[in-house]
Amino acid sequence: MIETSSLNRSWLIRMGIIIIVFLGFGVWGWYDATIAYPERGIKAAEFMEKEYLAKADDQGRLMNASVPEPVRTHAVLRTGATNELDAILFRWLDALSIVGRLSEEHTTFADPAKRLSELQTSWGSKKSPKPLSALDIPTQYLIMVTCTVIGLLVLVMVIKVSRLKYTFDPATNTLTLPGGHTLTPDDLAEIDKRKWHKFIVFLNFKPQHATLGGKSIKVDLLRHAKVEQWILAMEAIAFPESAKPAPTTDAPLSAAAEADPTTKPDNEQSQTA
């Protein structure tokens, strides 16, 4: 009966974990970029607004605390504040700019005294949230995009691999590769196992093969179950001498070998000499 390969379960589990981890970080980055960080930034800006209005009130300038041109004022103060009130004003405007709120809607007051009272009531003795830096939100967007792309690429790769099928006919020892090429042990010039430890093998074809003559085909043994045992079965027929395990130096010698000194290990021969 013809056998068909399936995805290697351990490899599939590993890829599934990678997909979940990267997509999970992508969702986390989206949440931080669109919800968590903006909320923290808005609260930090609100606290700085309270500090600014309180300082303006202390200096008797509360009624003139509105900033009708916040973008221009922010740009001017960026070059350097000349007094304590301007320094607090710049930190407030800078916090607003990070969360996209640097507009007259958020910097002008119909009743500055009422606004200050509202802020002092809502904040009380609470401490300011950690202010955002200009890179905090963009960095979270970068994490979101990078991790999501990687997760989706791995998912697409798994889907593509799942569509690749190897089949094997034990009766004729015929292996059918993805794409429809078939081969038997007689078609193999060599089975290159130099990367066997990495679950990679190269099948080198004899020139006489109808479609793959003289070519070398890379086979990934990790992704597809059963393929490894099929190739080993073909190797046992095509290259029986290679399929045998290599002798070990401590293997017991036969009685005939004991009688023939030329078969003794090198170190024993040197001692006899």
Image (cartoon, rainbow, N blue to C red):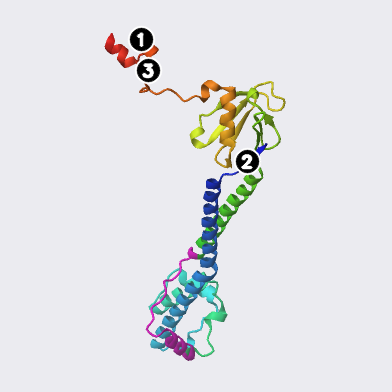
**Residue on which the image places disc 3:** 253
Front residue (pair 74, 126): 126
Q: Is residue 61 visible?
A: no
Front-most of residues 143 and 169: 169
Q: Residue furthest front?
A: 255
Report helix, strand or loop for mark 3: loop
> Is 69 rendered above or below residue 138?
below
Residue under numbered circle 1: 259
Residue 87: give x, y in percent of width and height: 41, 75
Instruction: Look at the image and give the residue range highlighted in magenta.
Output: 113-136
Mark 1 lies on a secondary structure that is helix
Asked if marks 2 and 3 touch (Cβ < 8 Å), the reply is: no
The residue at the point 54 percent across, 73 percent down is 71
Q: Are marks 1 and 2 in contact (CB under 8 Å)?
A: no
Q: CA distance from mark 1 to mark 2?
A: 50 Å
The image position of residue 136, as x and y in percent, is 48, 64
Q: Looking at the picture, does residue 75 appear above or below residue 23?
A: below
The kind of residue tagged 1 is Ala
Q: Earlier in the sequence, mark 2 or mark 3?
A: 2
Q: Residues within 10 Å of mark 1 (few under 14, many from 20)?
A: few
Q: Does the magenta segment cover residue 119?
A: yes
Helix, strand or loop status at disc 2: loop
Mark yes or no: residue 43 visible: yes
Residue type highlighted by circle 3: Leu
Question: Residue 30 location in percent, x, y?
Answer: 55, 64
Q: Earlier in the sequence, mark 3 or mark 1?
A: 3
Circle 2 is placed at which residue position?
A: 5
Up/down of 8 relative to 38, above or below: above
